[in-house]
Image: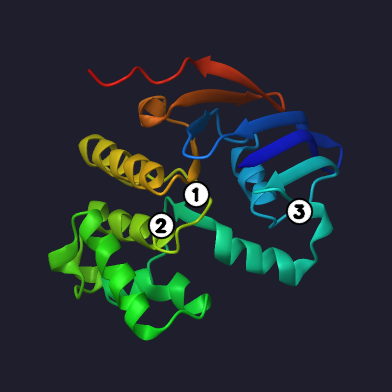
Amino acid sequence: MLSISGLVKRYDARTILDALSLVVEPGEVVAIVGESGTGKSTLLNLIAGLESPDAGRIELAGTDLATLDDDARTRLRRQAIGFVFQAFHIIPHLTALENTVLPLVLLGLGAQERHERATHMLEAVGLGERSHAMPRELSGGELQRVAIARALVHRPALVLADEPTGNLDPDTAQSVLALLAAGARAGNASTILVTHSEAAARSADRVLRLARGQLAVSHGPRAPAP
């Protein structure tokens, strides 16, 4: 689903990513851990086509990002990528349902299909009865559940999660991460979870550590459920 080879990114004289390579299979959840400033968010921006590398190749679902112009990259992001952020980025004057519908509006889906798919996703994350609540009426954990529903509603090939539990208490964080992983796997979406928290990475199939511009195995595959 995602293939990265020889990725290099520099800012002035500083090399952030140094010939980094990564392959993520469909349905796989990969956590990338590391200290602040090691380039985790930069890597996500490159994968999403928001920044361009200085060298290397990024292929998403067989498409080489380097072959796309800005408009084509925007279309690819809308169609193939779901985003979950630490700060939620929920629009405050829209209900949970209206926030979840947004990616489908951008894709031009009809009103009935948008409503059905968004309602289903909110039910899947346990917010079926809160679909008409305003963001100010929702807890932090509920807001992040809305963000997950919004990230998955258009059935992306890849989900990018940047410190998605940084604003949550530990118990809520584990619940939210389990939902994110389960939802992504159900749609066979590849998921990259970027975090500085070792605990947050435990829901992943594979944990990698980013240091000195390179990825290395931090933990083995997730143990199978009993």
In the depicted structure, whether residue 47 falls above or below residue 224: below
Residue 31 picture location, percent across and down: 49, 31
Q: Check contact, mark 1 vs mark 2: CB within 8 A.
A: yes
Q: Quadrant of residue 124?
A: bottom left
Q: Earlier in the sequence, mark 3 or mark 1?
A: 3
Judging depth in this view, the residue of 160 and 183 nearest the camera is: 183
Q: Determine whether the residue tagged by mark 3 lies in a helix, strand or loop.
A: helix
Residue at 48% from the left image edge and 34% from the top image edge? 28
Residue 65 bears which disc, if any? Answer: 3
Q: Residue furthest bottom?
A: 111
At label 3, the amino acid type is Leu
Residue at 35% from the left image edge and 26% from the top image edge? 199
Q: Earlier in the sequence, mark 2 or mark 3?
A: 3
On the image, numbered disc 1 is attached to which residue? Answer: 159
Distance from disc 1 to disc 2, alpha carbons, whole Å, reads: 8 Å
Q: Determine whether the residue tagged by mark 2 lies in a helix, strand or loop.
A: helix
On the image, numbered disc 2 is attached to which residue? Answer: 152
Distance from disc 2 to disc 3, alpha carbons, whole Å, reads: 22 Å
Residue 56 bears which disc, if any? Answer: none
Task: Tell me if mark 3 has few (under 14), some (14-19) or many (20+) residues whose alpha carbon lies within 10 angstroms of its own.
Answer: many
